[in-house]
Amino acid sequence: MNMNHGMDALSQSLSTITLASKVVCSFDKVADDYDKGRPDYPPGAMQIFAHNLNLQSDTSVLDLACGTGKLTKALVKEGYCNITAVDPAEEMTRHCASLFPQIQVSRGSAESMPLLASSHEVVVVGTAFHWFDGYKALNEIARVLVPNGRLGLIWNMFNPEYDWVKQIRSLLDQYAKNESHDTTNWQEPLENDKRFSALGHYTYRYTYKGTPEEVIDRLLSSKTIGSMTALEKEALTAQARYLLRTHHQTANKAVLEIPYRVEMYWCSKVKEATRSWIDLTRQVPKETGKISIKRSWHAEDSYSPPKALC
């Protein structure tokens, strides 16, 4: 083996481990703020997500990188109770387990899961896949999925189409210390992995009412906060409050319309797949809570959401 190639591979591996360790440590530091500051996944988006994953009430679902249980909570509310949750961060898993004592919650990473092969029909990842080592994670996801199992990726995030939101995000970027917190690079491993079919995609836009302080809470739930000093955190908070007091879209408002968008992707584990991009984004209604989609990527499947809650 070429010595330089071996050293490069080792360096890349160590870099991945270091980043993963930093991510876990940073999220552990903001576990309480994460749960307080992150809005729940909206029911309208969850119904579309579940439809495209062909979820039934007894479908075995793995919530990978479950965090404090935001996505688990949304699934349970929709009547999906056969859930296993895994996350590498101790405080995150402790919080999730306290909320859902009926669910098996374990510590583990996307790249090394404490689960048996072919143990789950569906794997879902909420606002986290971009932190994974994509190629290693897909090896593990393919291992724990049954044949023809499904993978669903979902992000619930600020909608930067609004200027004040873009500026809030810009403030956070100043403190990110070269650690990307919003990237599209995660798509490359999936596009190159022939074990998975083409990605389906849907964007769901919504707004919810909240105070300026709730926007601050959301800002403080970012992983970036966990790696900041106390002085940096204080400075960022002061800058964000000033922006909300002075920006023409938010000034003098006790209650804000906080814009969000949910990005959903799904695919199946297959031996051979016809890989063509399926984008339903333009069909998404902008009005909060209104769902116009009737047919989607799995249009041939009959689907009835479960009525009973857990």
Image: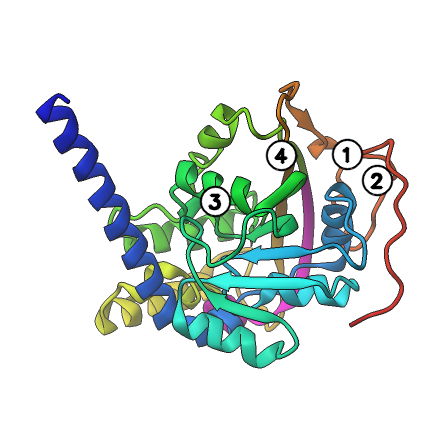
Which amino acid lies under the numbered mark 4 shown in the image of this protein? Lys
The answer to whether the residue labelled 4 contacts the one labelled 1, judged by CB atoms less than 8 Å apart, is no
The residue at which mark 4 appears reads as 269
Badge 3 element: helix
Residue shown at the point (69%, 56%) measured from the top left: 60
Mark in front: 1 vs 2? 2
How far across and how far down the image is residue 88, in percent? Answer: 41, 62
Judge the density around disc 3: few (<14), some (14-19), many (≥20) Cα neighbours within 10 Å.
Answer: some
Tell us which disc is closer to us: 1 or 3. Answer: 3
Labels 4 and 1: the sequence-earlier one: 4
Residue designated by label 3: 140
Sequence-first disc among 1 and 2: 1
- What residue range appears in magenta? 203-217
Q: Earlier in the sequence, mark 1 or mark 3?
A: 3
Provide the secondary structure element on which disc 4 rests.
Answer: loop
Residue 213 in magenta? Answer: yes
Name the residue that disc number 1 marks. 283
Q: Nearer the viewer, mark 4 or mark 1?
A: 4
- Mark 2 or mark 4: which is in front? 4
Q: Is 43 on the left-hand or right-hand side of 244?
A: right
Residue 197 horizontal/vertical position (percent)? 63, 28
Q: Residues within 10 Å of mark 1 (few under 14, many from 20)?
A: few
